[in-house]
Image: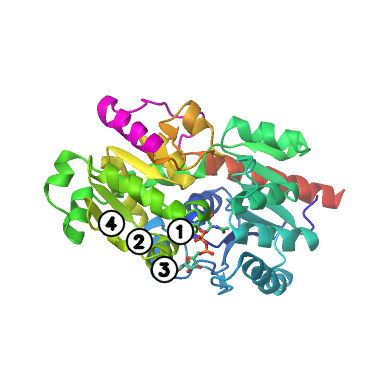
Amino acid sequence: MRSRNPGAGILCVVGARPNFMKIAPVIRAMQGATPPLPVRLLHTGQHYDAEMNSQYFEALGIPDPDINLGVGSASHAVQTAEVMRRFEPVLDQEQPAAVLVVGDVNSTLACALVAVKKGVAVIHVEAGLRSFDRGMPEEINRVLTDQISDLLFTTEKSARENLLREGIPESRIHFAGNVMIDTLRYSLKRAVPSTHTFSRYGAPADWAQGGFAVLTMHRPSNVDDAATLRSLLGAIRDVSRRVPVVFPMHPRTRAKIEQYGLGSMLDDGSFLKLPPLGYLEMLGLMQAARLVLTDSGGIQEETTALGVPCITLRDNTERPITVEQGTNTLAGQNPARILAVVDDVLRNAGKAGRIPELWDGRASQRIAAVVRDWLDGAAERLVA
Ligand code: UD1
């Protein structure tokens, strides 16, 4: 597709927490290009709590959104539809050269869909990742967003193969590297030391010396079903008897633990239960941890970049390079398997891993350069 309005700006979209770390360096690179690429920022409001939201904007240096759709939580259908309904008139008014979406959340797909139907070009950052698990809402969002994108930026080689297999023209695909790792490198110096977080939340002082694990868990497949959640919390309680576990809780997970009456399971292990943490606190904790247990996508990548062992509480990953080259091990939901992997990491320090190609902190600059060339080309084609 051509941009009908190549002289206009790029409308960047964010909706949920994992989007924020991805958009921050992209905006910085576009604004820092010579000449600067005009950008505007739209927040759908999918995540709205301060602890899921504004503290990230500040820590990551993201400008205040120019537009906030204030959508909030709802079922997938309602949330997606509501973003679309509210985004359409905004797009009519903004008339951007392109809409840039990141990642795989409902807001990503919703805004891409509105844009493509209006004839506005779509740029997808972090394209082509596939878990091959269509039961995962993010997988649907990834596949569909990629199908309707004009420029697709990938983070690892597997993504390009996935896109080609799905019939995406090669000319649209650009291997740029990983913008999350741009943010990580940019922020490392400002990471909050784990000792500060421990003293702020009252953890025993010896945890920082003796080593600790960090846990994050929020995927519907892990937390929505009572039996699965009980079994996972049981496994993690056993882990906490080997190494203390620091657990910043996603609102969804906290709500499910309360709903199913499982809170007491976290009382007799060695746990530090925390609210969702800011990016710089989380970075400081991960950096100092002996291991990280997670079902997040981004944390699999961040731990690989930090060289910290990661145990993923899923059977699959859309980020296979973190297993092939990085520090990640897939442990799934089986308690015996999780404990075996944890024991192995505690005894042998886990996989050494290496940094994947182009996870060098400059992915956003490469993206800005490609977008610039593409806009220039679009402008020339319009004149011709
Ligand atoms: C969304 C993304 C997921 C991402 C995750 C990170 C989709 C399909 N999923 O899942 O890919 O990994 O964000 O957080 O887009 N809630 C609050 N405050 C908030 C936001 C949510 O309390 O600011 C609670 C609400 O009860 C809500 C639940 O968390 O029902 C789930 O929120 P939602 O945005 O629907 O999905 P996430 O599970 O956060």
The range drawn in magenta is 336-360
- Front position in the image: 271 or 211: 271
Instruction: Say above or below: 157 vs 241.
Output: above
Question: Does residue 307 appear in this view?
Answer: no
- Front position in the image: 271 or 309: 271
Q: Secondary structure at mark 1?
A: helix
Residue type at tag 3: Gln
Does the CB distance between marks 1 and 3 fall below 8 Å?
no
Give the residue displayed 43% in from the left and 70% down from the top.
49
Write down the residue under mark 2.
Answer: 262
Residue type at tag 4: Leu
Q: Secondary structure at mark 3?
A: helix
Question: Does residue 331 appear in this view?
Answer: yes
Write down the residue under mark 1.
Answer: 226
- State which tag comes first along the sequence, 4 or 1: 1
The percent position of residue 70, horizontal first and vertical second, equals 55, 74
